[in-house]
Image (tube, rainbow, N blue to C red):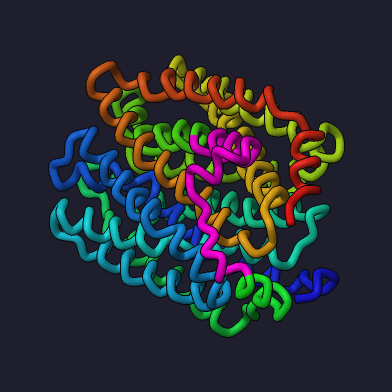
Amino acid sequence: MDHKNNSRPIFVLFLIVFIDLLGFGIILPILPLYAEQFGAEANEATLLVAIYSLMQFLFAPLWGSLSDRYGRRPILLLTLFGSVIAYTGLGFATSLGILFIARGFAGMMAGNIATAQAYIADITTPANRSRGMGIIGAAFGLGFILGPAIGGILIGTDSDNANFHLPSLFSAGLSLLALLCALILLPESLNTETKAKIQAHRYRQRRINWRHLLQRLQLFMLIGIYFLVTFAVAAMDSTFALWSKQELNWNAQQTSYLFAFMGLVCTIVQGGLVGFFKKLLGEIKLLILGILGLGLGLLLIGFSKNLILLLVSITLVAGGISITQPILNSLISQITATEDQGQILGTASSCSALARIVGPTWGGASFVKFGSSAPFLSSSLVVLLALIISLRMTKNTLESKAERVV
C-alpha cells in the first residue's frame, strides 16, 4: 500500500477499532460488579479480568504471526467475529462459570488491536508512525468515553437490580458492526514486496523469543516498560469499581461515568497533544513524562476521599496512559525489521496481556489482604521501576539501533 495514499484506510481502521473498543469500554467498568452478582469475592472478580488477559497472552503472538503470513485483514475479520460470539455469551450468562468461559473466549479473539497496530506499521513511515499509533490510541479514548457512558445508561441507577445482560448484548451488536465495516471497507495492507520479504525470511525459522529479546537490550527494555505500565493500569482497572463502591459508596453507573471521563482525557491527549509534545520534547523525554504522570496519579487515587482530588488523580493516570502507549508502540516498531512487525508487536501485546493477568490478580489479592487502596499504592511503586528503566534510555541509542535493522 502506498504510504502517500493511506488516509482512507487509517480512517477505516480508526472506525473499526473505535466501534470494537466501544463495546469493550461498555463492559470493563461493570465487569467486577457483574461477577459479584453471581457471588464472587473481590479477588475472584478480578480473576474474571485476568482470564481474558491470560487467553490474550497465549493467542496474541499467534494472531501476529498469522497476520504476517496471511495478511492483516483476514485476522481482523476472524477476531471481530469471535468478539461477537464472546459478548453474546456474556450477555446470556447464568453463572459465574459461564462468565469465565465467555471472557476467556473473548481473550482468545483479542488479536485485533495488535493486528491493527501492525496494519498502521505497514502503511506509515517511521517519521509519521507515532501519529498513526496515536490515531489508534484516539479510537481507544473515544471508545472509553462513550462506552462506559453507554454502559452506565444501559445498566441503570438501581444498584440492587442492575441490568448486566443488556450492556453485553449491546457490545455484541457493536462488534458485529465493526466486522461488517472491516469486511466492506478495509483493504489489505501487506503489499507484494513486504509479503516477499516475509516469505524469504520464513525459511530461516527466525523466532522472536526471550533469548532474542535479551540480545537486543533496547527492545527488551521497551517491552519491559510496557509490561510494568500495563501491570499498574490493569491493577487499577480491575479494582476501581470495587474501591469506589467501598470508599465512596458509588454504584456501577457512577463508576462507568468516571471511566468515561478517563476516556475523554485519553482522546484529548492522544488525538493531538502527543504529536505536539513529541516535536517539543522528543519521544524518550515524552515517555518519561507520561510514566511520571501515571505513577503520581495512581499514588493520589489511594488518598482520594473527595471527587475533586479523584478527578485530578484520574486525569494524571489517563494522561500518562495516553502518552506512554503510543510512544512505546512507535519505538518498538521503529527498531523492528519490516518482516517482523506483526510478530514483534504481537509479542509486545502478549507481554502486555501477561501484565493484565498478574496485575488484576495482584490487585484483587492486595485489595482483600491490605485494604482497598493497596492496589493503587503498590502500582505506583511498579511505575517507579518503569520510570527508572526509561531514564536509562536515550533517543540516540534507539536511533542507532533503528539504523542497524536489516
- Magenta region, main secondary structure: helix
On the image, which quarter does residue 186 sit in? Answer: bottom right
Residue at 16 percent of width and 51 percent of height? 96
From the viewer's perspective, tell me whether residue 172 is left or right of residue 126. Answer: left
In the rendered view of the protein, which quadrant contains the N terminus? bottom right
From the viewer's perspective, tell me whether residue 141 is left or right of residue 351. Answer: right
Residue 142 position, x and y percent, is 59, 53
From the viewer's perspective, tell me whether residue 143 is left or right of residue 53. Answer: right
In the rendered view of the protein, which quadrant contains the C terminus? bottom right
Residue at 33 percent of width and 55 percent of height? 55
Please say whether residue 45 is one of the residues in the magenta stretch. no
Picture layout, residue 298 above or below residue 256: above
Q: Which of the pair 364/31 is nearer the observer?
A: 364
Tell me how many marks there are.
0
Picture layout, residue 329 above or below residue 303: below
On the image, which quarter does residue 11 sit in? Answer: bottom right
Q: Which of the pair 109/277 is nearer the observer?
A: 109
Q: Is any part of residue 172 visible from this angle? A: yes
Residue at 55 percent of width and 49 percent of height? 145
Q: Residue furthest bottom?
A: 184
Residue at 62 percent of width and 28 percent of height? 291
Q: Which of the pair 306/71 is nearer the observer?
A: 71
Residue 17 position, x and y percent, is 56, 63
Q: Which stretch appears magenta? A: 201-227
Residue 100 position, x and y percent, is 22, 53
Residue 341 position, x and y percent, is 62, 59
Picture layout, residue 323 above or below residue 80: above
